[in-house]
Image: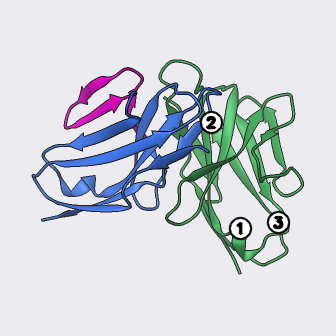
Amino acid sequence: GQNIDQPTEMTATEGAIVQINCTYQTSGFNGLFWYQQHAGEAPTFLSYNVLDGLEEKGRFSSFLSRSKGYSYLLLKELQMKDSASYLCAVMDSNYQLIWGAGTKLIIKP
Amino acid sequence: SAVISQKPSRDICQRGTSLTIQCQVDSQVTMMFWYRQQPGQSLTLIATANQGSEATYESGFVIDKFPISRPNLTFSTLTVSNMSPEDSSIYLCSVGSPGVGTGELFFGEGSRLTVL
């Protein structure tokens, strides 16, 4: 079966750095996505990786290793507004998105 | 980008009734997706709504329970029929072209249904 694993919850301190990991097992691979979802709101797109390596976008970076079925989202200089759930999703060979359950990130002052 | 309006944003419903959720997009899109997100769980695709043809349902979801309309390229509705408490969830409308470009999806604000 297809599976996306990410930690349920993480806690970090304002101003620090946090890495949220995602491992996947899917039928084929056509890219990995990270979405941010604040409580009570819709998910919003953060990043897309289809090739191995690191994609940097401001305070957020996303890394992919296809051989390991592994990705991480790196958040730097954490702000209170970064408190949200972070969803990892993989597009399989049929271009279907397989979603992880999300990682709830709690930022403490 | 796409701006998506969904309504109702939330509702409390009685068991056995049906509710229709509307999704309006500010641009013409080929495919619209309906997702369900239960508390603490991942997004689950219910169906893909195609303009001019019947919706394509995922395993575990059937047309009788979740009838979908797609009358034009900017609008779709999802009906949750004969509701039970297990249908309490957030229902999200989404647009995008996962097979093209980055595959970024845009989501509506969601409709939070509580079935008593």
- As measured in the structure, the alpha-carbon distance from the residue carrying label 1 to the one carrying label 2 is 25 Å
Q: Position of residue A106 (x, y in %)?
A: 26, 63
Please identify the quadrant where the C terminus of chain A is shown: bottom left
Q: Which residue is mark 1?
A: B87
**Which chain is green in the picture?**
B
Give left or right: position of B42 versus B77: left
Q: Nearer the viewer, mark 3 or mark 2?
A: 3
The residue positioned 29% from the left and 48% from the top of the image is A20
The reply to the same-chain question for discs 3 and 2 is: yes
Q: What is the three-letter code of the residue carrying label 2?
A: Val
From the viewer's perspective, is residue A16 above or below residue B82? above
Q: Nearer the viewer, mark 1 or mark 3?
A: 1
Residue at the farthest bottom position: B116
**Which chain is blue in the picture?**
A
Q: Which residues are magenta?
A: A44-65
- As measured in the structure, the alpha-carbon distance from the residue carrying label 3 to the one carrying label 2 is 23 Å
Q: Which residue is mark 3?
A: B18
Q: Earlier in the sequence, mark 1 or mark 2?
A: 2
Q: Position of residue A60 (x, y in %)?
A: 24, 37
The local crowd at label 3, few if under 14, some if 14 to 19, many if 20 or more residues have their Cα within 10 Å, is some
Q: What is the three-letter code of the residue carrying label 1?
A: Asp
Magenta stretch: dominant SS?
strand
Q: Position of residue B98 (x, y in %)?
A: 58, 27
Q: Which residue is mark 2?
A: B25
The local crowd at label 2, few if under 14, some if 14 to 19, many if 20 or more residues have their Cα within 10 Å, is many
Camera-side residue of A47 and B20:
A47
Camera-side residue of B108 and A61:
A61
Do the numbered discs 3 and 2 sit on residues whose CB atoms are within 8 Å?
Answer: no
Numbered disc 1: secondary structure: helix
Please identify the quadrant where the N terminus of chain A is shown: top right
